[in-house]
Image (cartoon, grey):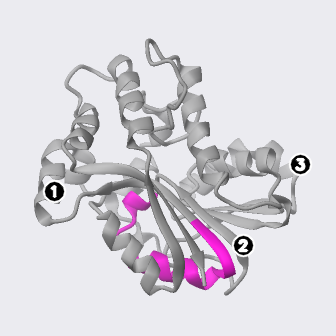
């Protein structure tokens, strides 16, 4: 894959920067977490990891039974811990983690070496982009992505590529944060949050993505807001993990002001 296609901030953040080392994350996962049921009085690093695992479980429960017959792929798998969790806890037939960054694929194979040796025919990690997935047409029963789509430069190509690789009746589940519609929201987000200002994150409106899915041939498109289970808990953990006044503390304010929210989007390939 042509590495020049990786946006510079994405290349740096997930390459030499290795975002999983940041104080706001823990345990090798890289997501804001599902904090439902977690005591926020003084969250520990272990509870931080639990929140990130819970976000994966929330996504993976959206796939129907019997799960042991489903072949899945994760788009934007990072260090691959979520794909390993999907196989270990949900017993899918096979799971392939896909990431555009070669450093992340290398890390995933190293971190999950034991799981790869245990399930050599069921777990894999492969280089690929959201708009160019390494699978033939109709190859997968399910496709999911956990807090990666905000890095994709555009979502139209992803929607059509997801439709290509999923078999008829296959399911797509995407969770990440989406921006409110309109240029004003995108401008305000770039002023509040450095990740939008430097191009790491893209202000994708939710309605635009759901329209892309419908246009690509998906049906039953739903979007569930889970912001109440994400933003307050993440911000409470940040209070003890980053310096006072750090820009990442503005995420919860942007949510309260209606500039962005966290959603789980589900769609079925017709």
Mark 3 to mark 1: distance in Å?
47 Å
Please state the total of marks drawn on the protein image: 3
Magenta-drawn stretch contains 10: no
Magenta-drawn stretch contains 155: yes
**Circles 2, 1 touching at the beta carbon (< 8 Å):** no
The label shown at residue 185 is: 1
Which residue is label 2 attached to? Answer: 141
Residue 52 at x, y percent in the picture:
55, 37
* Region in magenta: 148-172
Mark 2 to mark 1: distance in Å?
36 Å
Question: Looking at this rendering, what residue extends furthest in the top direction?
Answer: 42
Which residue is label 3 attached to? Answer: 118
Q: Eyeballing the image, is 164 above or below 224?
A: below
Q: Which residue is rendered at x = 42% and y = 27% of the image?
A: 23
Query: Label 3 neighbourhood size at 10 Å, few (<14), some (14-19), many (20+)?
Result: few
Q: Which residue is rendered at x = 56% and y = 23% of the image?
A: 47
Could you say whether the residue bearing mark 1 is in a helix, strand or loop? helix
Can residue 154 be seen here? The reply is: no
Say which label, 3 or 2, has the lower sequence index. Answer: 3
Query: Label 1 neighbourhood size at 10 Å, few (<14), some (14-19), many (20+)?
Result: some
Could you say whether the residue bearing mark 3 is in a helix, strand or loop? helix
Can residue 242 be seen here? The reply is: yes
**Circles 3, 2 touching at the beta carbon (< 8 Å):** no
Say which label, 3 or 1, has the lower sequence index. Answer: 3
Q: Nearer the viewer, residue 106 or 238?
A: 238
Mark 3 to mark 2: distance in Å?
22 Å
Q: Quadrant of residue 236?
A: top left
Could you say whether the residue bearing mark 2 is in a helix, strand or loop? strand
Q: Eyeballing the image, is 241 above or below 196?
A: above
Q: Eyeballing the image, is 43 above or below 197?
A: above
In the image, 99: left or right of 170?
Answer: left
Q: Eyeballing the image, is 66 above or below 257?
A: below
């Amino acid at each position: 894959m042509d590495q020049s296609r990786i946006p510079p901030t994405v290349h740096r953040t997930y390459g030499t920067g290795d975002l999983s080392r940041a104080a706001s994350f823990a345990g090798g996962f890289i997501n804001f977490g599902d904090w439902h049921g977690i005591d926020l009085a003084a969250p520990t690093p272990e509870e931080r990891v639990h929140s990130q695992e819970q976000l994966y479980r929330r996504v993976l429960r959206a796939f129907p039974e019997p799960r042991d017959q489903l072949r899945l792929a994760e788009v934007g798998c990072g260090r691959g811990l979520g794909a390993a969790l999907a196989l270990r806890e949900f017993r899918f037939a096979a799971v392939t983690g896909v990431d555009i960054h070669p450093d992340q694929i290398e890390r995933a194979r190293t971190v999950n070496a034991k799981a790869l040796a245990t399930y050599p025919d069921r777990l894999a990690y492969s280089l690929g982009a959201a708009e160019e997935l390494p699978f033939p047409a109709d190859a997968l029963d399910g496709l999911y992505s956990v807090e990666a789509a905000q890095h994709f430069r555009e979502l139209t190509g992803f929607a059509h590529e997801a439709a290509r690789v999923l078999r008829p009746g296959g399911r797509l589940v995407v969770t990440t944060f989406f921006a409110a519609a309109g240029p004003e929201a995108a401008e305000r987000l770039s002023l509040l949050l450095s990740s939008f200002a430097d191009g790491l994150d893209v202000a994708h409106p939710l309605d635009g993505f759901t329209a892309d899915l419908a246009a690509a041939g998906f049906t039953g498109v739903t979007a569930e807001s889970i912001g109440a289970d994400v933003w307050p808990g993440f911000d409470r953990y940040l209070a003890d993990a980053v310096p006072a006044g750090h820009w990442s503390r503005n995420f919860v304010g942007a949510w309260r002001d209606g500039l962005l929210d966290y959603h789980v989007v589900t769609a079925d390939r017709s």
